[in-house]
Image: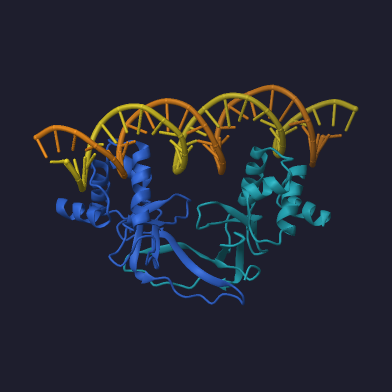
Chain colours: A cyan, B blue, C orange, D yellow
Amino acid sequence: MDTQIDAILKKNQLSVTGSRKRILELFLTSTGGALAHGDIEKKTGEKFDRVTVYRTLQTFLEKGIIHSIPTVDNSVRYAMCKETCAGGHHHDNHVHFVCSVCSNTICLDTVLIPEVKLPEGFQPEECQMVVRGVCKDCH
Amino acid sequence: MDTQIDAILKKNQLSVTGSRKRILELFLTSTGGALAHGDIEKKTGEKFDRVTVYRTLQTFLEKGIIHSIPTVDNSVRYAMCKETCAGGHHHDNHVHFVCSVCSNTICLDTVLIPEVKLPEGFQPEECQMVVRGVCKDCH
DNA sequence: TTTTCATATGCAACCGAGTTGCAAACAAAA
DNA sequence: TTTTGTTTGCAACTCGGTTGCATATGAAAA
């Protein structure tokens, strides 16, 4: 596990530091879906400065290690990217699910966003779909 | 026009005040899609207090006069509801389009959000779909 | 029209999320 | 071990949004 984390950081030309290791570990071991900034601060026991967490997430985002997820309640969450994600450009064409009971955000990797036919003149570039409801654990 | 505004307010048991009339007028005459809080402040020429604008939007939202729209960039925008919207509960099942050139948000009333098949155990309640791209005016 | 009363407004102060500049701490390479 | 460029933590700040309270105002009664 520790070697895996080091490998991911090195592969992205990032120096291996305490906060990066810890935050990356959280993403790798997280079972309850995507993580918000607040979740990370809590789970690290406020060991790292708020600013460090923000900057680490920013860095991971730029390198394509994680991707951001839009939510209905206007907060930002993050999840690990799949292998196919390269720096900056994500294959993030799956539906996200937000549970209204446990408020976890889950990547439904197997559910692809369907194509929609837009009115004349509209050129789509990117599409996001968020479903709110009850997840399979809270059901 | 003025009578129409008064009628909408009265129908929703709201007293007719300057700020409510002006903000409602903005929504009725707005051609460039949905309005963000900032747009409203600008268009009213800072005539009303920030707080008043916030509270007016809140009120309209509760009464179902307007509905909120999720955006990719995590800002909140509002648009007029269709006749079929009742207080608090919206028939907001259409796709929203955010233009990456003019950054207007447009309700594509004619484009309904397609049904998606979720994995076993997931119960959907609400679904939102946002397409980012170039709108027909900027095209 | 005037009076009354609930409601809406404006102000000031506050809150939380996120950002920036800078000095100190640290990882990686020499 | 020393050097150097990057990362971290702190403080201070910005921005969007909220709250409490006194004042102003709309609507309904007199």
Q: Position of residue A35 (x, y in %)?
A: 64, 54
Give me the residue at 27% from left, 35% from top: B47
Give me the residue at 54% from left, 51% from top: A75
Question: Taking A46 as reference, is A134 above or below it?
Answer: below
Question: Taking A83 as reference, is B56 above or below it?
Answer: above
Identify which residue, C12 or A49, lies in the foreground.
C12
Q: Quadrant of residue A125?
A: bottom left
Quadrant of the image for the C terminus of chain A? bottom right
Quadrant of the image for the N terminus of chain A? bottom right
Q: Would residue A119 be found to the left or right of residue D16 on screen?
A: left
Q: Position of residue A45 (x, y in %)?
A: 74, 44
Identify which residue, A34 or A91, lies in the foreground.
A34
Give me the residue at 52% from left, 71% from top: B124
Q: Does residue A131 appear anywhere in the picture?
A: yes
Q: Does residue B38 appear anywhere in the picture?
A: no
Question: Taking B42 as reference, is B28 above or below it?
Answer: below
Q: Would residue B69 be found to the left or right of residue B6 on screen?
A: right
Question: Taking A15 as reference, is A94 above or below it?
Answer: below
Give me the residue at 37% from left, 55% from top: B62
Q: Would residue B39 be found to the left or right of residue A106 on screen?
A: left
Q: Would residue A122 be found to the left or right of residue B73 on screen?
A: left
Identify which residue, A20 or D11, lies in the foreground.
D11
